Image (cartoon, rainbow, N blue to C red):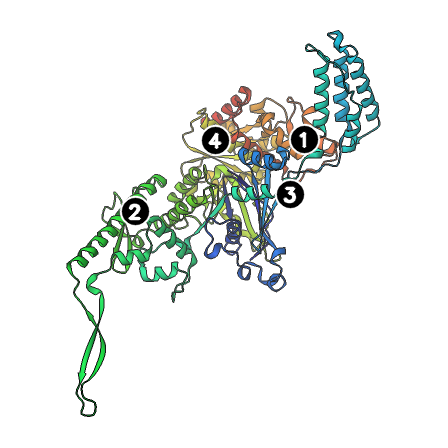
Amino acid sequence: MMTLKQFRVQNFRSVMDSGWIDCDNITSLIGINEAGKSNLLLALWKLKPARTEGESKIDALHDMPRHMYTQWENIPEQIKFISAKFELDDATRDKVVALCGCEETAAQVVEITRRYDTKYLILFPEYLQNGAIQAETVSDITNSAKKEIISLNEKTKAEKGIKGKVIEALDKIITYLTGKEQLSSADLKSINEMFPNNIHKSATSEIYPKFETVKVAIANAFAPLKSKNPSDSEEARTLILAEMPSFVYYSNYGNLDAEIYLPHTVKLLRGEKVPGFDNDAKVRTLRVLFDFVKLNPEEVLELGSDPLKQERVRTITMHIDNYNRPNKTNEEEEIVDITPDESEIKEAERNKEARAIKLDSAASSLTASFGEWWKQGDYSFDFKADGDYFKIWVSDKKRPAKIELQKRSTGLQWFLSFYLVFLVERQEAHKGAILLLDEAGLTLHPLAQRNLVAFFEKLAENNQIVHTTHSPFLIDTNNIDRIKVVYVDKEGFTVASDNLRDGIDASNKSSIYAAHAALGLSVSDVLLQGCQPVIVEGTSDQYYMNAIKLYLIQKQKIIPDKELVFLPAGGTSTKGVQGIIGVLGGKNEELPVILIDSDSNGISLKKNLLSGLYMGDYASCVISAKDITGMDNSEVEDIIPFSLIEKAIEKLLRNDDDLEFDTVYSENEPLLPQIEKFAEDNGIVLESGWKVELAKNVKLRLLKSKDKIDDKYEQMWITLFNRFTNEKQ
């Protein structure tokens, strides 16, 4: 299944350009009301909705930014509003390669864009059309082959002279390459013409197989010049659209009513208007409800119709005696109730019984499947039809009496309604579905919201989730990198960022309140209840520690009694650290553990803490990186195996000279100064926040990789976490 890696909203309602938004299995969008979080989800939904109806349809009149509508209404084919990058699974990638003959690397990622004319643009951003290759590559292949062939011998008289011919050809190629820096397709043609023809070989030849090998190696070196762009293949584009996951969107506005008036429902599902009812989200939920029941509301009405209410038309013939017009007759129609006969009564009884059985069967099925899906309760559902009304009743073990759905919690109403939409539309999606949840679980109790976070983790094993929230209880502090802040920029448009401090001015100050509260930076007792806080210097350290914690718990290397919560101090300022200690230590007058780097700033901070707050019994609660690594000036990055961070460093330090950091890396020296020196020496500018990006990549790789961690580092981690949990708090 294709995996959503990033999406970008442009030219949609309040969003002119959100910027690229990174996605994980679960992605949380936080921000104040009216920041535009819902608009981001709605645009993404319209990329490929599981069902195209209601708000999921592209509607330029309401979806284009108001101030641009008159300029754009007649050119919808030129205006794009949603783009998404997907990583292809191996099977889909191989199909693309087979269809268009491109390189595997070119088919790893696809970017899909949709415009207001509903059409799609398909691009493969990893495809690079190279006009030339490095001559050095072919020169190395040729020189290496020549050295090897010189050491080989002709085996039989039949292949006499083969060695000299092959070496002569290689010398020609080497001479041809001298002074060249780059090679084109024309150079490959010239090189092929230098290879000897009609050479003799024997069955035991050592030289001929090597000769064939070098020809193949040179041809492969030129392969990038022949690589086809999969974006040019109509078959590949059609395949991608078919394989792209569908999106299922849900908001609180679609919550079901407990009592559903069937005559209105019949009209709504036909697309007709009902006075006083204008809620497309609820119509959608009604539709999936009846799809689940496998009935349509009109049939429910018909099966439950009472034969006693059937009206018949009777024709009455009347004789009129009139002296002017004798024997004149007149016919009139009279509507009367006619008592049904026995067969009609039995048919009505069978219909009502069939309806009751179908509703009971559907309710039993819903009870069973909902129980498998949501394990926080043992709910039992009952569907009843009474006259023109369809009703939903709920009971559970604590409250066995059946109660109308609308008299149960709004949280349960949300779960049931969302579940029906998810269940039906996911099944229709076939290729998997990505869930877009707007203010998910907003009406749930805080503890139930915590359960919802755990439920999301389970759900995300098969279905990626992007959700918006205001609640700190719906933010997973173990995966703070999943949070994106949504705010309004100075021009009044919606943007999103991985940096939780972006856009924070007087008007947007509360945008990241939910994240700060979830991190334990508010004075809420609830958030810190039962937790063991550990202060780290910065956000990157928080990522590393959360990743290591999850790894050690998964491997059963540690079993902490309390939830370990890592809180970034925002640097090595003594004042800043003391401020957080004031919040964390205020509850029980105990001091939290602090993990700091052993660079000059960290050494200074440790000295200040040990001579002040942490003097005496609490000295062991201040842990420096050197305590774990044994290396002077070491930092948290130095307890990470190089194999985990190497690829992220390569991406960070990519340059035109193809210089590799691993050729200069030393395991016996602190990592970060080495990275900074390499960048400086090679004219590479390290962007702001590069340390955080490294940490995020390490976390993803550690939790998804099946590679074994070197015992040296695993033991470092165990030692460190034992200090977190065993030292005096």
The mark that comes first in sequence, 4 or 3, is 3
Residue farthest toward the bottom in the current orientation of the protein: 324
Q: Is residue 379 left or right of residue 645?
A: left
Q: Nearer the viewer, mark 4 or mark 2?
A: 2
- Residue receiving disc 1: 675
- Residue receiving disc 2: 362
Q: Nearer the viewer, mark 2 or mark 1?
A: 2
- Report the front residue among 232 and 32: 232
Q: CA distance from mark 4 to mark 1?
A: 27 Å
Name the amino acid, label 3: Asp
Secondary element under disc 1, as helix, strand or loop, is helix
Secondary element under disc 4, as helix, strand or loop, is helix
Residue 617's x, y, as percent?
48, 28
The crowd level at tag 2 (other Cα within 10 Å; few <14, some 14-19, many 20+) is: many
The crowd level at tag 3 (other Cα within 10 Å; few <14, some 14-19, many 20+) is: few
Mark number, residue 232 = 3
Q: Which image quadrant is residue 370 in?
A: top left
Residue 302's x, y, as percent?
27, 58
Q: Is residue 312 left or right of residue 595?
A: left
- Residue receiving disc 4: 550
